[in-house]
Structures are given as C-alpha cells and as structure tokens.
Image (tube, rainbow, N blue to C red):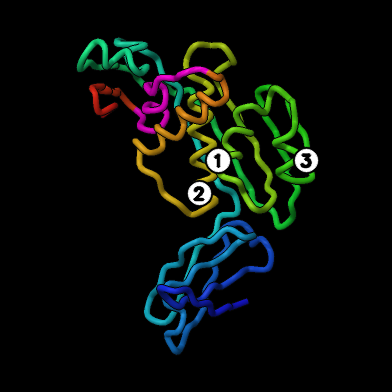
Amino acid sequence: TIKRQRTASRSYVTIAAARSPEPNSLFVVDDLHGLARGATLSICGSPRPMQRSGNRFALAVATSCEGNGFIRVDLAGGTLDCWPLHVFVGPCVTVNLSIDVMTGARLEPLSTSEIHLEVSDLNYKKTFPDLASLLASNDKELCLVQAVLRHFQPKKGFKLRTSSQSPVGGGLGRSSSLCISLIKAFLLLEGRHMGVYETVNLAHNIEAEVIKAPTGTQDYFPALVPGLNLIHYNAQGAR
C-alpha cells in the first residue's frame, strides 16, 4: 500500500509491505509523477530507506538482520578503561586484540506480537506472546536481552537467536561482545546507523544496567573494530 503523509516540515510517501517478504527479494516501485520524495519501505512496521533512480525506487530485502561481535584478549592497560581510574592516572592506553571467536544475534521480524527467543549456548528456548511478557520474565538467561529490548522497544514481534563461541565466565568479554551483536542486529532492523563511540557508550551503559555496577569500555571496541586496538583514555573519554 502507498500512503501519502504530511508533517509540519515536509510531505512524504510511505510504501508499506503487508507481509514479510521472501528472503533476498527485491521491491521495485514506479513513481511516474515523482510524488514519492523521501520514500521509505515499511516491513512489518520497521521503516527502511529506499534507493531512487529517476522515477523508480528499489530496495533489496534480507528478512533476517544479523549482528556479530568478536571476542578479545587483553594485552596491556586492563581496568584503566573503567571510569574514573583513567582520570586518576592521567592519559593512558589500553591495548587489546580481537580473536577469531565470535558472538552473534540473528533477528527475523514478524507481523505478529509473538517473540521466539533462543539463547543457543545456554540451551534456552522460549516463546513469549508479546514484549511486555518477555520483559516481565525472571529467567536469568534473559537479563542482557531484556536490557537491550528495553532500549529499542520494538513495536512488532520477532525471532531472535543468539550464539557465543566463548563460554560464560571465560573472562574474554563474552557478554560485552554479545551486547554489541544484539545492538547491531536491532539497528539493522530499524534501518539505523550508529558510530563506533556512540555504540560503545550505549553498550557499556546497557551492561552496567544488567550487572548493577560500573563497567569499562575496552571490551566493546574489539567487538566492533576487529584487529589490534590501542584505546586512548583521557578526561574526554576514549579515543
């Protein structure tokens, strides 16, 4: 369906898909009169920007959104990433390295309110009728997922499967990497982009909410930026 809408600042057209598309499908919409300026495609309630060529819009659609994060090993400067320790010490550097051990989050939007959740490395699998019931659950396996969902507040249901090649309590930043994977998947679902520092700031605040304690930020950089990381800390934060 095509809807023409108007706000105080502009007029625009929303092209809405009534059902979830097939994997790797392509939407093409002809706009012969050039009316659909700034069009978006809404898939299961999530808007996606469309590419325009002349009077034709197109969007290649993948029905799953996947986020992945690397696990890290700490080489030098550990704990200096925790505020306010680096403020007490003065300008300092934390060094770590991404390794080929991954976490992942695979997200598939649904047109209903149901949420099908699987935390594969914890052998947890459950279906919830809606977001409110998932957030009200006391299942300990859900703590991190719940914190991420409280931030994103998805309007529709979805299937979510998380995975980790690093064991719980392994000391390699599993939960931090998984938090990055979840954030990346939900940003893809919303069609949004977030920079490295903004993503790190969001992730470490979400994880602090989960563990009820201050957290550092060094674990999140190698999850996002694979390779050798030299993270500089000063009074302005991390760079």
Q: Nearer the viewer, residue 190 or 224?
A: 190
Left or right: where does residue 93 sit relative to residue 97?
left
Q: Where is the C terminus found, in terms of image quarters?
A: top left
Task: Tell me which numbered mark, 2 or 1, is placed earlier along the sequence.
Answer: 1
Can you give x and y, in whole percent of width and height, for residue 203 in the image?
A: 46, 31
Q: Which residues are magenta?
A: 213-226
Mark 1 residue type: His
Q: Which residue is mark 2?
A: 188
Q: Where is the N terminus found, in terms of image quarters?
A: bottom right
Q: Nearer the viewer, residue 226 or 209?
A: 209
* Dot 3: element: strand
Work out whether 236 lies above or below 43: above
Task: Tell me which numbered mark, 3 or 2, is placed earlier along the sequence.
Answer: 3
Q: Nearer the viewer, residue 59 or 12?
A: 12
Identify the image quadrant of residue 233: top left
For disc 3, the neighbor class at 10 Å (few under 14, some 14 to 19, many from 20) is: some
State how far apart marks 1 and 3 are (Cα): 18 Å
Q: Which residue is mark 1?
A: 151
3 vs 2, front mark: 3
Task: Tell me which numbered mark, 1 or 3, is placed earlier along the sequence.
Answer: 3
Mark 3 residue type: Phe
- In magenta stretch: residue 217: yes
Mark 2 residue type: Leu
Identify the residue at image location x=32%, y=26%: 227
State how far apart marks 3 and 2 are (Cα): 22 Å
Identify the residue at image location x=23%, y=22%: 234
State how far apart marks 2 and 1 are (Cα): 15 Å
Can you give x and y, in whole percent of width and height, for residue 66 in the image?
A: 54, 42
Identify the residue at image location x=29%, y=16%: 94
Q: Which residue is mark 3?
A: 128
Identify the residue at image location x=50%, y=68%: 40
Can you give x and y, in whole percent of width and height, for residue 232 in the image?
A: 24, 22
